[in-house]
Amino acid sequence: MMLPIDPAYWDAFWEAATPEQRDELMWLLDQDLAKHIWRAQVGRQSEAADSLAFIIGYGGSAGGGKSDLIAGLSLTEHQRTCIFRREKAQTEGIVQRMTEILGSTNGYSSQKSIWRTTTADVARLIEFGGLDNPTDHQKWQGRAHDLKAYDEVTEMREAQVRFTQGWTRSSDPKQRCRVLKTFNPPTTAEGRWVIAYFGPWLDKHHPNPAKPGEIRYYSTINGKDFECPNGDRFVMFKGEALYDFDPTDFRPEKIITPKSRTFVPSRVTDNYFYVRSGYIETLQSLPEPLRSQMLSGDFNAGVEDDPWQVIPSAWVEAAMARWKEREVKGEMDSIGADVAAGGDDNMTIYCRHGLWFDKPIRIPGREIPQERGGPIAAGHIIMNRKDRAPVHADVVGWGLSCCNFLTANDVQTIPINFAKGSTGKTRDGNLSFFNLRAEVIWRMREALDPESPNGPVALPPDPLLKADLCSYRWELRPGGIFIQPKDEQKKLLGRSPDDGDGCCMANITTMKVQTFEQMLSSVRTVDRYKELD
């Protein structure tokens, strides 16, 4: 006979039990705790702990036992663990929980932020780290752990999380490896990357929603996640996923194995101990939208933009909601290209057809050798250019060589030097721009403005593009509108805003050479007739 596991049942049993029965129950519990220092609570916490997915998202409302899950799994199921918070000092709460579980701090070094302990006859190493500075992730390069745990992952930069989780592995073939990401709904726009990352579970507009705990499979190609039908290995061949292949025909690094991913929602009502403590009443007293975020785990409740954000998130979301795939795209009016060669940054190309922007074309910088960066980058642009569309390319760095090659091949090219001065004014004519960077980015804001007289812009629903466009910050200086320097923007994003810059350059309107020549020819014809008269 299986005993009930509902804590409320045992509460009722305890109240009705005799003193002898209570003594016997306590003896049984002591025997169990001698073997198991921690057990996941029945319900959502157990679902997350028992999930077979490689990447597990767990969270929603406050008080769902997220930190407890990290502490418990570290001490019972893993040999080498690394626990991250945005600031390393914030891991103190997990240290305290581990102290409660173990009964002491034996083996913990606060100076080295390492805990060495032995439980269930298994030697365990637990490290604590922070990802506050833009380069902090580099300290963990090559550091293998069979559990990478990120507590309140919405406070961290997506690029740093992806980088550090790349070394989730073990030399022990019997050791299970996994990534655990716990979080409440994001309270800032920067943390909303998790909604796209766990899109089938969290994005209410996702075309293929998933049930809580359902396992999906993903692979990451050229920095973008792709959902796979199952966990079968495949190779990319001529831009398509090929599942029926001979492994001997491909190098091992070309064979891609999708990783499993899931999300398990937590609620404070799942945490029996918090229910008894009255914590729900505390959450109920919070002001909105924080109440809905923390009590109900509502990921769509009022995330506020930074007051100095150039482009409101709602405008970007509306433009992406309007976007539809097109078989006939219409005439191409402009190309924006953020050029890269070598390194980790992408070369990004955006093509605009009227008010409709096509999907981004991304070429990893490492695929463009620096010694031939200019002609190769120019070749990528030419291959995607149609209708003699003007090319707007960042001329700084590798962009100069690219622009020179384009011009030499009679491609209408407008080099964009963001540091150059601007003589433009905002649409209402009230404000000047500090430099060309400020003008180009502000023009994107004006294009996305719901009150724009030019009509609604449609942007491809791409998470990188959305993050970039929402990351621009501005201030008013004596010289006019000033946009936060790119280096500061990189600190906010943890990467270069290649997509945002490319898209904003594609938004630039430049008259095509042939259009100008046709107009000039018409004027000359009119003048000739006047002479004849």
Image (spheres, helix red, strand yellow):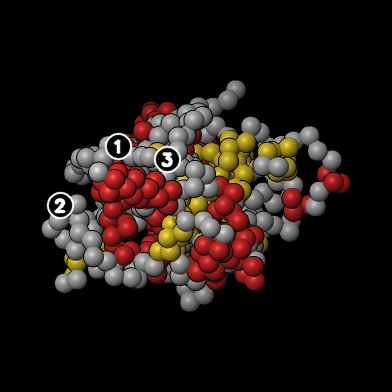
Lower position in the chain sequence, tag 2 or tag 1: 2
Q: Which residue is mark 2?
A: 428
Of residue 491 and residue 28, the one placed in the foreground of this image is 491
Regarding residue 201, the answer to whether it shows in the image is no
- To which residue does mark 3 refer? 353
In the figure, residue 333 lies in which quadrant? Answer: top left
Quarter assignment of residue 355: top left
What x and y, as percent, mark residue 235? 73, 43
Residue occupied by mark 1: 456
Instruction: Give the residue type that dot 3 points to.
Output: His
Look at the numbered disc 3 and give the secondary structure of its residue.
strand
Quadrant the C terminus occupies: top left
Mark found first going from the N terminus, 1 or 3: 3
Q: Quadrant of the N terminus?
A: top right
In screen coordinates, is 126 left or right of 192? right
Residue type pointed to by label 2: Asp
* Residue 530 visible (yes or no): yes
SS assignment at label 1 = loop
Q: In the rendered image of this protein, does residue 353 appear above or below residue 416?
A: above
Residue occupying image coordinates x 39% and y 32%: 204
- Residue 251 percent across, percent down from the top left: 80, 52
The single residue placed furthest to the top in the displayed view is 1
